[in-house]
Amino acid sequence: VVFAMLAFICFVFFRHQTDAPQPLRDGKVVSKSSSSFTSNPDIRHAPEETILPQDIEDAYVNIENLPIGIMDTPIYWHIPRSGGTTMKLIMSMCMGRVVACEQGAGHQLDEQLELLNKPFGNFANVDTSTPLGLQRASELGLIPSRMVDVVLTPHVREATKLFDSHHKGRLFALFRDPVDRVVSLYYFLRMPDQEASVGLNVKEMTLAQFASDISENWMVRSLTNTMTGPLDETHLNIAKEILRRKFLIGLLDEKTESLRRIESYFGWKLPSRVSQTCKNNMFYFEPQSKNIHDPIETNSKEYQILVNRNVYDIELYEYAKALFEEQQSLVGGK
């Protein structure tokens, strides 16, 4: 969790002002011809000429390319404060999957891959939550080893180095409203056990200060590998096209249906009634890293700051919600 938080905030110290459009949450959208499962003419797609980055194209399989190959590995994009820690424990504890994530930290001197048996699951001895850890995982041949069932990382671009022409990744994620996500991050970082881990005295910051200093289109920046400098519509369109072609979309607000789709798409089965109870407890009754706070008022100064600084992420999230509906034809749904 800590490394995912650091990935979210580290670029702020080098940030530049973005030449951003107004949010399109309630605006009219335009149409674009689409793939076999994105037929809604009201979705604001990326232009036809949008080209994916070559590393994304080479490393990750298109979402509609089925069946899943035996050499394909699920890659969970861990978006901070979007249910990623809970998903990790569901996959490791409840589903019995071997996971690569931050649980492999502290083993950088290990000379070969090993399985770490922990009370909450089995993990590889590599830390895929950091670019350096991903580089080490690549050098040790994590994916060709077939040791892990799923990789969790906030760095989908850096994770491309794990794959080759014979081993591909399949991306999936839970998406959350960007404003709610940043507010949750603010209150999470104010918790006593988080202060030292990120090196920021968030307790001394108001939400307005935090919103002004920290949060700026983290999703679009991460997907386009543009952690500093200005963003424009080109970056947003590339991020949209990555979601459309490469991601199985889940929504935190639709977590029951999202998890059902993830299980169906990857063919994951809960092996017993105990496993089913484990999943239900994790997902509904004991969500990990949860922090209770009052919702932000939509007419508040803080809300407007967050919206204005995250217009690209907001539009990307609205696009993800539209894709979630369209993907019913791919995996079935309610």
Image (spheres, rainbow, N blue to C red):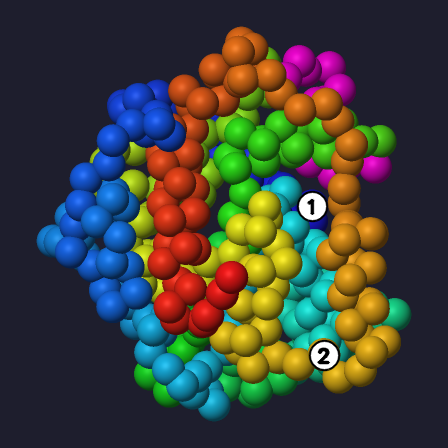
**Residue visible at 78% across and 72% down?**
276
Q: Are marks 2 and 1 in contact (CB under 8 Å)?
A: no
Q: Would you identify the image quadrant in which residue 196 lies?
A: top right
Indicate whether residue 199 is drawn in magenta.
Answer: yes
Question: In front: 43, or 300?
Answer: 43
Is residue 188 rendered to the left or right of residue 149?
right
Q: Is residue 38 left or right of residue 139?
A: left
Nearest to the eye among marks 2 and 1: give it: 2
Quarter holding residue 14: top left
Q: Assess disc 1: are there few (<14), some (14-19) or many (≥20) residues with their C-alpha within 10 Å of its C-alpha.
A: some
Whether residue 126 is situated above or below residue 173 in the rendered picture:
below
Between 112 and 251, the residue placed more toward the observer is 251
| Residue 189 pos. (x, y %) | 72, 32
Circle 1: element type: helix
- Disc 2 versus disc 1: distance between alpha carbons? 29 Å
Label 2 packing within 10 angstroms: few (<14), some (14-19), many (20+): some
Residue labelled with disc 2: 270
Residue 291, placed above or below residue 59: above
Q: Quadrant of residue 221?
A: top left
Residue linked to disc 1: 2
Q: Residue at x 69, y 62 (%)?
A: 88
Q: Position of residue 157 (x, y in %)?
A: 41, 58
Amino acid type at image mark 1: Val
Residue type at numbered disc 2: Leu
Which is nearer the eye, 53 or 237? 237
Residue range (magenta) = 193-207
